[in-house]
Amino acid sequence: EAGVVQSPRYKIIEKKQPVAFWCNPISGHNTLYWYRQNLGQGPELLIRYENEEAVDDSQLPKDRFSAERLKGVDSTLKIQPAELGDSAVYLCASSLVFGYEQYFGPGTRLTVT
Amino acid sequence: EDKVVQSPLSLVVHEGDTVTLNCSYEVTNFRSLLWYKQEKKAPTFLFMLTSSGIEKKSGRLSSILDKKELFSILNITATQTGDSAVYLCAVLYNFNKFYFGSGTKLNVKP
């Protein structure tokens, strides 16, 4: 069984540039999560999808971040424009049902210069 | 304010030692607590706990939840260098909220 796939694995951009991350969850997993993890911290939930519906985006900085999950499968997370403080690892996870075991992708390490 | 606190922040032990990691929480409408191991990349699932006093065990790792005192412990016996990682706990609460602690960084020396 393939795991959660994310791309790119690394991204370096200059501030004020846009950036997008892509996630393909495990087949059949209805719940998809985007997290941001800063060094020395636990993952911070940005947005959670149940199928194609964003059911919790309370921690998503909506002035510059956006996300979508078309057809309830793949998802993209976008930042526009990026700021220096956005440098972090962006993790995508999926689970069969919300609240149960989450399977994480390898993450995208973003560096904003 | 809801919170999840892990202790210690970091720990250095030698192979063969036993370690106990702690996760305490103060949240509304607690549902479950999960433990994850994070090496250099993504967190991997260890245990999910919902009931007090029932130990979950997998090899040298075990965990238990105390819902009265609002904490969970993760025990690792006979530690090995491969146990070196950050151990994260996460709490599901308030019906639809999910919050990770900052983790305990474990370093097992040969």
Image (spheres, coloured by chain):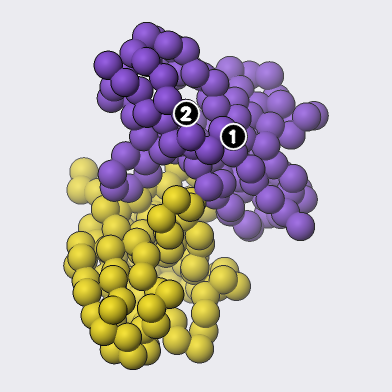
Q: How dense is the environment of label 2, judged by Cα within 10 Å: few (below 14), some, or many (20 and up)?
A: some
Q: Alpha-carbon distance for marks 2 and 1? A: 9 Å
Q: Residue A72 placed where, x, y %?
A: 37, 69
Residue beneath the point at 37% across and 28% down: B107
Residue B7 badge: 1
- Marks counted in the figure total 2
Q: Secondary structure at mark 1?
A: strand
Chain letter belonging to callout 1:
B
Q: Is residue A29 above or below residue A72?
A: above
Q: Could you tell whether A19 is left or right of B11 in the image?
A: left
Give the position of the C terminus of chain B as an image quadrant: top left
Residue B11 badge: 2
A49 vs B76, nearest the viewer = B76
Residue beneath the point at 24% across and 80% down: A13
Color of chain B here?
Answer: purple
A2 vs B1, nearest the viewer = B1
Closer to the observer: label 2 or label 1? 2
Q: Which chain is yellow?
A: A
Q: Is residue B22 above or below residue B28?
A: above
